[in-house]
Amino acid sequence: MDKHPRANLEKKAGLGKRFTARFLDGLLVGVVFGVIFFLIGGVGGAASGENNAVVTGLAGAYVFMLIGFPFIYFLYHTIMEAMYGYTLGKHALGLVITDESGGDITWVDSIVRNVFRLVGFFFSPFSALLAVVLIAMNDDEQRLGDMAGSTVVVEQV
């Protein structure tokens, strides 16, 4: 995987590509997290020794999912974007995240833009609607996290 590929600041990603990339990333993280979820449920249920071990294990795994999934999703985006300039979903669509001048984003940029994604998990669907409105209405097609982190999602050269 290329680290921080060159960006074309003239070609913003747009809603369609950003939505598709987010869907692909969500699918990837969801599958990995699903495996973890069922492992925790099975191990937790077996360790409980109760008559209804499966229910006990899945209940514990469900609580982990509610709290853990948003943070794992946050870490996935933050680490991938800071290290490579894209997530796997964005890379599949030829997108890259840059700072507003076209340079590589820093760890701080990635953390700032993704804190807004993390907060959005707890206020959905309002945060998703706000992101769509902001991307559609501003010239740089930035969501709130992009504005705060001074980043932009564009096509690779």
Image (cartoon, rainbow, N blue to C red):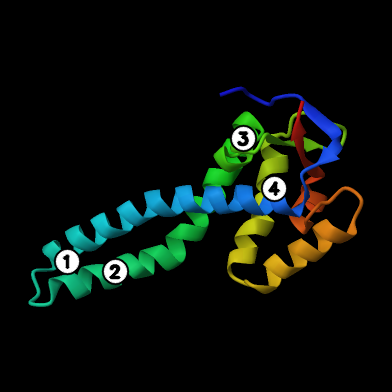
Residue at numbered disc 3: 91
Residue at numbered disc 2: 60
Residue at numbered disc 1: 45
Residue at numbered disc 4: 17
Measured in 3D between alpha carbons, the distance from the residue under mark 3 to the one under mark 2, in whole angstroms, is 34 Å
Label 1: few (<14), some or many (≥20) within 10 Å? Answer: many
Which comes sooner in the sequence, label 3 or label 4? 4
Q: Quadrant of the C terminus?
A: top right
Residue 32 at x, y = what percent?
Answer: 38, 48
Measured in 3D between alpha carbons, the distance from the residue under mark 1 to the one under mark 2, in whole angstroms, is 8 Å
Disc 1 residue type? Gly
Task: Give left or right: position of 66 versus 21.
Answer: left
Q: Quadrant of the N terminus?
A: top right
Discs 4, 2 touching: Cβ within 8 Å: no
Q: Residue at horizontal 64%, vertical 57%? A: 117
Task: Give left or right: position of 13 versus 117.
Answer: right
